[in-house]
Image: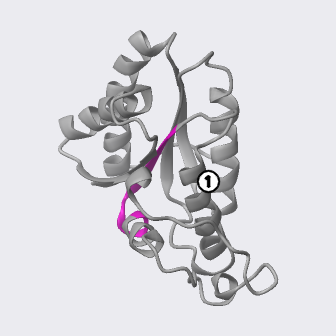
Amino acid sequence: MNVAVIWSSPNTDGLTASAKEKFLSGIKKKDGKITEIHLNRKKIEHCRACGNGWGICRSKGLCVLKDDFEEIYQQLAEADGVVFVSAVYWHDITECMKAFIDRLRRCETRHNKFLAGKRCFLIACAGGTGLGAVECLHNMEEALKHMGMRAYDRIPVTRFNKDYIFQALEQAGEIYTTRLEEGFDMQY
């Protein structure tokens, strides 16, 4: 199984990176192939809403901006499953993740549908008070639903629950990989 793990945090040794590593260790236990994408190290421009709001993303499923978007989009399309891991800023995903998902949604929803039906796993990491992690997960899932993607599970990580959630994330990585191999029984 090929699992694309797309994550966003400028801090490569903080809560978000640690949560991502725990999930990856679970995938590795099941010998899953991992495509790791750190958005903060990629060049992803914000959507310009060209063409009066709908450019060639609507008609051709492509974006006119020349950056790392197309390469990442292809990696997600080729993956069996996709894991989204984001730090929480202002009760939402990071700006890097938002820029990427906004452009992805424009290409995917109206034209391509390469990601429709993919089972995703969502992780939101809130380092401050912990407030906003659940709201962030909700926002991620709403964006993914527009593209026909399905959340297998959603895990909020905070500095207060990390001691037990990190263990759960490793096991979740194993189970998610197994479900990708064997199929899902969820209905919705």
At x 60%, y 72%, the residue is 108
Stretch of the chain drawn in magenta: 76-86
User: Would residue 155 be visible to someone looking at this image?
Assistant: yes
Side of 79 relative to 87 (left or right):
left
Q: Is residue 117 above or below residue 30?
A: below
| Residue 37 coordinates in the image, percent (x, y) | 36, 54
Colour mode of the rendering: one colour
Q: Amino acid at mark 1?
A: Lys
Q: Is residue 71 above or below residue 96?
A: below
At x 41%, y 66%, the residue is 72
| Residue 62 coordinates in the image, percent (x, y) | 56, 83
Locate the N terminus by quadrant.
bottom left
**Residue 83 falls within the magenta-colored stretch:** yes
Side of 164 relative to 63 (left or right):
left
User: Would residue 188 be visible to someone looking at this image?
Assistant: no
Identify which residue, 168 or 55, lies in the foreground: 55
Side of 167 relative to 110 (left or right):
left
> Pointer 1: what residue?
98
At x 31%, y 50%, the residue is 181
| Circle 1 SS class | helix
